[in-house]
Image: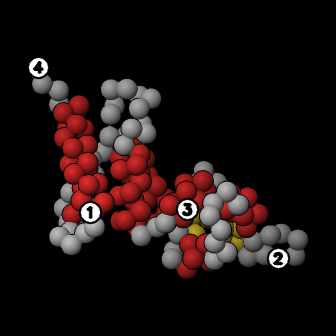
């Protein structure tokens, strides 16, 4: 993956699926957190701006807050609006996604990856096979044969 620097998104679908399952997020929740990652602080208006592009879920903000992905940074006082920020849990998850896009292997143990448990869906088994293949390619690119 590192040989072509513009090829970061080659395995995006696999990495995205891994993240959704590992962190128990929906696609829309993951998209929202990725959008907010570059915002140090944000108000509900910024959240709602991007949320309008996603599937309608009136409880998304509160769910992300309740599940520990978003935390209030500053309370509303007078004319100053309340501000929020992503939690350390969120930033670590997103940094992990970026590392995997940059060529870090996805774990294949059933303790670190729920897709490698015994009783999983057919689609998880297909993703599992792709993760194994992807990891082989990453290892091969890291240590090319002579």
Give the numbered dot on residue 146. 4
Q: In what element is the residue under mark 4?
A: loop
Q: How is the image coloured?
A: secondary structure
In the rendered image, residue 105, in percent from the top left (x then y), is placed at 27, 47
Between tags 2 and 3, which lies in front? 3
Disc 1, SS? helix
Residue 28's tag is: 3
Q: Earlier in the sequence, mark 2 or mark 1?
A: 2
- CA gap between label 2 and label 1 equals 51 Å
Q: Nearer the viewer, mark 4 or mark 2?
A: 4
Instruction: Tell me which residue sits at (38%, 57%) in the image.
Output: 17
Mark toward the start of the polypeptide (4 vs 3) = 3
Viewer-side residue, 90 vs 29: 29
Task: Kindly check if marks 2 and 1 are in contact, taking CB atoms under 8 A apart as contact.
Answer: no
The residue carrying pointer 4 sits among few (fewer than 14), some (14 to 19) or many (20 or more) residues within 10 Å by Cα, namely few
Question: Is the C-beta separation of discs 4 and 2 under 8 Å?
Answer: no
Where does the N terminus fall, quadrant-wise?
Answer: top left
Residue 39 lies left or right of residue 125; in this view the side is right
Q: Quadrant of the C terminus?
A: top left
Q: Residue at x 19, y 41 (%)?
A: 136
- Residue 54 in the image, given as x and y percentages of width and height: 63, 60
Q: Are marks 2 and 3 in contact (CB under 8 Å)?
A: no
Which badge, 1 or 4, comes first in the chain's sequence? 1
Q: CA distance from mark 4 to mark 3?
A: 44 Å
Q: Position of residue 128 (x, y in %)?
A: 24, 55
Q: Which mark is residue 77?
A: 2
How far across and how far down the image is residue 63, in percent? Answer: 57, 77
From the image, tell me which residue sits under label 1: 122
Q: For numbered disc 3, what is the local secondary structure?
A: helix
């Amino acid at each position: 993956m590192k040989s072509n620097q513009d090829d970061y998104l080659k395995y995006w679908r696999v990495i995205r699926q891994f993240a959704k399952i590992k962190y128990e997020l929906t696609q829309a929740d993951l998209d929202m957190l990725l959008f907010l990652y570059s915002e140090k602080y944000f108000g509900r208006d910024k959240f709602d701006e991007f949320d309008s592009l996603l599937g309608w879920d009136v409880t998304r903000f509160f769910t992300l807050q309740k599940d520990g992905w978003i935390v209030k940074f500053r309370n509303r006082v007078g004319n100053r609006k309340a501000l929020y920020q992503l939690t350390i849990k969120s930033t670590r998850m997103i940094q992990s996604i970026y590392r995997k896009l940059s060529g870090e292997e996805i774990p294949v143990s059933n303790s670190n990856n729920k897709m490698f448990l015994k009783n999983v869906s057919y689609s998880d088994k297909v993703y599992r096979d792709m993760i194994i293949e992807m990891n082989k390619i990453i290892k091969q690119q890291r240590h090319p044969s002579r």
